[in-house]
Amino acid sequence: MTRPSRGTVVELNLFPRELAMQKRLTALRTALVGVVTGVVVIGTAVTAWAVPAPPPNPTDTQLNDAAVTQQAAAAEVGRIAALVAQAESDLEKYSVQAEAAGAAYDAAVDALAQAQAQADQAAADLQTAQANVDAAEGRIAEFSRTSYINGHTLSSAAALLDSKGPGELVQRAAMIDWVADNQVDVLGQLEAARVEQANADAAARAARDQQQAAEEQAQQAKRTADAQLAAQQSAYAEVSAQKAQYEQQLQDAQIHLLELQGARNAYDQWLAQKQAEEAAAAAAQRAASSAAANQVPSDHGYVLPAAGRTSSCFGARWGVQHLGQDIAAPIGTPIYAATSGVVKRAGTATGFGLAVYILGDDGAVTVYGHVNRYFVQAGERVRAGEQIAEVGNRGQSTGPHLHFEVHPDGEMYSGAVNPGPWMRARGVALNGC
């Protein structure tokens, strides 16, 4: 098998679940390694740490101006709303008045029609009475003329005998009976009828004139009420349009203020995230500096395998033996060879997912489990402090960490001892347990 050059990334065919997990963790690993080292070098490729551009940050003056504009628009909307309410009240009042004026006008028109009918009836009655009077006067005149011609002593019998025929006889008999019954006061009755009819006609005409005047007054009141209603409708429409305009201005002002506030919030979040990233980068830099300091082999030729926090110690745990010491660190954190030696195994490992086994020059085997990626292969010689892998979360793991084991007797799968005391005895502060 061709031996890869130093720094070459070696990856095996992984199970689908592990491959998906590796893809999800690639971005985070790249960012963390970039923070620690400034650039990540894999083969000949260089990936620089990129900081996203900040979002726009509205000034306090812009926010204050927007708030003032919004408050002014709200105040104006309130003022216009009061005017609209008053206009609505006035519109209702003028509507009622116009309705009442219309009803009064209709009543006046109806009363005028009735008065006109009464006047017409009185005129008709007067005409009938006048005809009766004229007929009666004609009969009396005829009777008087006949009496004068025949003499005042003409008796009723003589008048009848003087008739020239049966028709005239009947007429004279009727006239004699009528005059006998009415000759005393017939003229007075006729005069009284004339006066009564004249009075009735005058009363009817007066009533008609009065109702006509009332109709004209009602018509004028109706025109006035209709004009007031039309003017109020126009005023209401005007203030309603103004209210709609100011409400739109208020909405625009509110949207503008919300946009500025949203932009300020986004900038604050970006700034907080940037500060957190800078703090994390500083902490990672300090950790890297500390780790780099530890990469100088001790007098015995050993270095700290990874920078991080001890999360689990060597010994019995939940009824089984934990054969190493766990160092919790972010995925991508560099893993270094704890001592110089030869790689005995690198790749898949039961329980570890991926692991690297190194046989040191002192005869001890050091094991590096749950790695995310490894950069060496079996048979390759490494020196103490050389990066051989990066921290991962593969295999039976509950979080990203390095599982570090020491086998002093040179066996790869047995003879593990507590790494903490063993490393400290060789000048490396592997503490926490």
Image (tube, grey):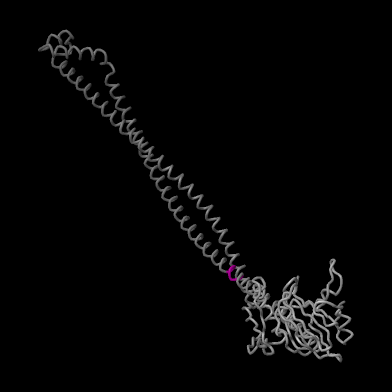
Q: Is residue 374 above or below residue 74?
A: below
Foreground residue, 310 or 130? 310
Q: Identify the residue shown where x is 15% and y is 10%.
A: 160
Q: Quadrant of residue 29?
A: bottom right
**Residue 115 or 139: which is nearer the viewer?**
115
Q: Is residue 12 left or right of residue 190?
A: right
Q: Is residue 384 above or below residue 161?
A: below
Q: Position of residue 401 (x, y in %)?
A: 77, 76
The relative height of residue 265 versus residue 229 in the rendered view (above or below) is below
Residue 144 highlighted magenta (yes or no): no
The image quadrant where one finds the N terminus is bottom right
On the image, the x and y values in percent for residue 333 come to 74, 81
Instruction: Please provide percent x and percent y for residue 44.
Output: 63, 90
Which one is nearer the viewer's eye here, 323 or 205? 323
Instruction: Classify residue 203 by image quadrant.
Output: top left
Quarter in which the C terminus is drawn: bottom right
Q: Is residue 287 above or below residue 112?
A: below
Question: Magenta stretch mostly in which secondary structure?
Answer: helix
Tell me what residue is drawn at x 29 percent, y 32 percent.
Answer: 123
* Residue 145 position in % (x across, y down): 16, 19
* First to last magenta residue range: 253-257
How many discs mark residues in the rendered view? 0
Residue shown at the point (49%, 57%) measured from the top left: 236
Q: Is residue 212 left or right of residue 414?
A: left
* Left or right relative to 154: residue 351: right
Is 391 placed left or right of 253 in the picture?
right
Residue at the limit of the structure toward the left, as seen here: 164
